[in-house]
Image (cartoon, rainbow, N blue to C red):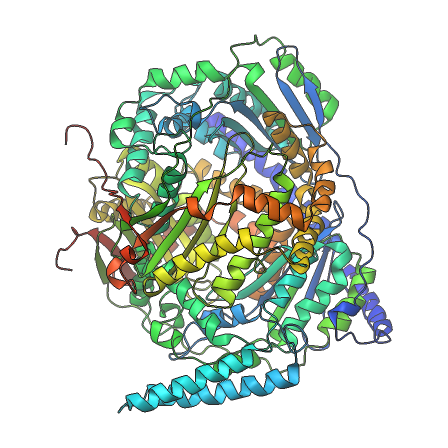
Amino acid sequence: MRMLRRIAAASLLALAAGAFAQVTDYHDIKTPPLRKFAMPQPKRIVLGNGMVIFLEEDHELPLIKGRALVRGGARDVPAGKAGMLTIYTQAWRTGGTAANTGDQLDDLLEARAARVETGGGTDSTTVSLDTLKDDFDVVFPIFLDVLRKPQFRADKIELAKTQANTGISRRNDEPTGILGREVQKLGYGAASPYARQSEYATIASITREDLLAFHDRTVHPNNIILALIGDFDGAKMEKRLRDTFGSWARGPQVTKPSPAMTPAKAGIYFISKDDVTQANIAMVHPGIERSNPDYAAVQVMNAVFSGGFSGRLMQSLRSQRGLTYGVGGGVGAPWDYPGLFRIQMATKSETALESVQALRDEAQRLVTAPVTAEELSLAKESILNAFVFTMDTREKALNQQVLLELYGFPPDYFTKYPALIEKVTAADVERVAKKYVHPDQLAVLVVGNEKSFEKPLSTLGNVTTIDVTIPPPPGK
Amino acid sequence: MRRVLLYATLLVLIVTSVTAQDLASFEKRATMRKLDNGLTVIVLERHDAPVFSYATVVNAGSAQEIPGITGLAHMFEHMAFKGSDRVGSKDWPAEQKALAHVEEAYAAYDRANHAAVRDDAQVKKLEKAWKDAIAEADKYVVNDEFSTIIGRAGGVGMNAFTAQDMTAYYFSIPSNRFELWAFMESERFRNPVFRQFYKERDVVFEERRMRIESSPFGRLMEQFLSAAFMAHPYGYGSGIGWPSDLHSFSATDASNFAKTYYVPSNMVVAIVGDVNPAEAWPLIEKYFGRLPKAPQPPELRTVEPPQGSERMVTLREQAQPLYMEGYHRPAATDPDNATYDVISMLMSSGRTSRLYRSLVRDKKIAAGASGFNGFPGEKYPSLFTFFGATTPGHTPDELAEGVQAEIERLKTEDVPAPELQSVKTRVKAGLIRELADNEDLALQLASYQVTYGDWRELFRSVDRVDKVSAADVKRVANATFTPNNRTVARIVSAPKGAAK
């Protein structure tokens, strides 16, 4: 009945709508100002032992989610142990706690449709929880046990190693996988913690002691940011967390490594793969860090170069020439270490060289062809109008504060960001393009079936062939 | 174990009330109506932030194709970003003439190109005439004006997909752009213009090369589906189209396809977010009401006949081994659909699932293994499919044996009550989690409305899962997983250069 009444009301309104004039040009459509809104920000709590806690109430659904973010990640793994972080983050959870094996945890949690999982990346690891709120009292103690008392049982370390070895054995099967991995090595240098790859030998060398040592080195309250969001009472939750974590003693602080970058020399690099009909192409040289004062101008430049369908790369290579399904690029700017300037695309083998040339031309044009007023306004308006989507949910607002805390940026960083974009001028874009994009320094990588290229790759210059044969396991 | 069971039982009570509550709360916030032209629109209010998401779902996909036009549903999806007579043209009357000329020139070229006795010189001449006509038409194009307008207005996540059963279009945009959205979204279907069609056809071919031809998994999938279906369009490879058709079909073909299937009564639009229904409905009526009423498209007649023989395909590749096996099962509207969902969860969901514990954890022969529904679609009878990737040194045959052992357990042993309960609990909680995101929810509401004729089925399907018994699982497993109903596809590793 309720639905019927609503429909009747809507029909009345529809009659009124007939009086509107027909719009035939989208320019005639008025845009009312965007409703002012402020997403509720999480409460920040700092414990005496240095642990930082963020709490965000969200009562729409009966759920509680959270994660402990622990400083220290893949870049902190010892040389010669590449791949250790994957083994560590997998066995951290599957290896169980003092009270339960990992398999027992699986049974306990899945019966409640709850999750406690471990993960990790370049600079940090995480223990996360996701549960119906009524199960929080069962799930939270498991979360604490996983965080503080993991056992890394041997059978699950072996299982994680088998999985890692499977990944190694399959890493040359998909061309995009090869490209993604090898371009990183060209950009940072193969030995860099931001590019190094695991091998059967490095996986074999990892021991349970290595994993326990990494846990001991990183999991201390002063290295942890804990964030919780969901259907709970903030004051009660705060008290519970203070009681739980307040007496945990500080430990050694994880410090950020500063490895040297050893990018590859400019030139053409080639990896042969003959079971494909496309050439995968990438170009790379060093980029910048997020803290760079030119960051906002670089973002506008990136949007001009490769923003959606309207960016120069998609316009030139897809819409106008039909050479590719996907092409993208820009100056990368990770939060606390140098990124890469990178372009990549895939095209049919028969247009491989044409595409390499077209991409080089676009990189050159970024430096030499001034950004037009139209390009600048489109880039800036796109970023500014879409800015609301960076904090349109409570969870996003929470995650932003966690990121800022982790990387030491001020809490109002995102609030102030639109003003920085607004200030960017065409001259700024031209200046940062000249400063951070260097077409003559690009390492160009092509993965594909050279027999089908329209011309030998050597017609573009000296070609360095990269051998991606997988080194066999030790003793084989 | 007893304690686990007790907790699980308590929990179910809680969760059941939660889903019922959610349905009631969503019904309160949702309005739905059918416009005079037959278009169904759903509006669901959520006022956290001044943004909304939408999904337009068309009840037509690659299953609506016939030989000669395979890939056309997906091709039209690409064209729906090229604008209309009012968006994307510098001079519509001139462009219209030029585009008509492109089609004439293409028809002549295509006929000569496919002639049984081919006159190469003539083909070349006609090809040039066609390309010249394209160059002329291109002069009037404002490149990607549609996407640019949305991007400038702050639209994010603009994309679309073509599946066997449906085609969906979606993005999110600040709520002060509601009227612009209503204009643009209806405009792209009111009078879609097939500008730059043949260039975009090249782009789509690149997508085929990327997803299918250059990927071992893509090649396996195409072979698997082609083997599993001999009559139904679910067997036309991957849905992206055969190379010959992608090289041949025309803008006229695409236009005919759209005229048949992109009619208001065959489409659903769902909007979720900061929208005031009192303001939104008049704008929806005003803009979407412009879509002309048209007859309901024809239903697909072909039904896949019973399989009657086991089928097996082997791809000899440089890549590492992969394994798939599929069994025909009824469409999603079948009363046993919920039982198939339960079987899929039992086999694949989480680390307690049977395939994980048996093949990954204990035997260590698979890096990952799953059994799932809805492949390649679910509107028509489709497949229950098992998929696995071997660990180093193990073979697809070992995976086949391992899967078979788990199938035998389904057929012969009752699912223990706690295991069945755990699955049901996760299905319910899964729905609650899905409700959190505007974009996901818009797509779900529209898809359920298209598939089942009622978006509430999203909630009811969970109740149906709750009623599945251990006996249902046994019965359905015995009826489905039989040798003559099986199609197997596998990649076996052949050294580089070996005879294939």
Task: Please state the horizontal and vertical placement of residue A327, each as a whole percent of the image.
Answer: 47, 56
Please name whichever residue, B262 or A188, is drawn nearer the observer in this view of the structure.
A188
The residue sitting at the left extreme is B499
Question: Compared to B230, does A445 lie above or below?
Answer: above
Left of B80 or right of it: where is B322?
left
Left of A258 or right of it: where is A351?
left
Residue B385 visible, this orientation: yes
Please name whichever residue, B425 or B206, is drawn nearer the observer in this view of the structure.
B206
Q: How many marks?
A: 0
Residue A7 visible, this orientation: no
Task: Please state the horizontal and vertical placement of residue B11, each as a whole percent of the image.
Answer: 58, 34
Question: Compared to B322, does A289 lie above or below?
Answer: above
Task: Please state the horizontal and vertical placement of residue B23, each as a whole percent of the image.
Answer: 67, 50
Q: Residue at x 49, y 86 (%)?
A: B103
Please name whichever residue, A377 or B360, is drawn nearer the observer in this view of the structure.
A377
Quadrant hosting residue B218:
bottom left
Q: Classify the position of the C terminus of chain B by image quarter.
A: bottom left
Please name whichever residue, B467 or B307, is drawn nearer the observer in this view of the structure.
B307
Task: Please state the horizontal and vertical placement of residue A425, each as a whole percent of the image.
Answer: 69, 48
Q: Residue at x 42, y 32 (%)?
A: A194
Left of A148 or right of it: where is A347?
left
Question: Compared to B354, does A250 lie above or below?
Answer: above
Q: Classify the position of the N terminus of chain B by image quarter.
A: top left
Question: Compared to B462, does A459 lie above or below?
Answer: below
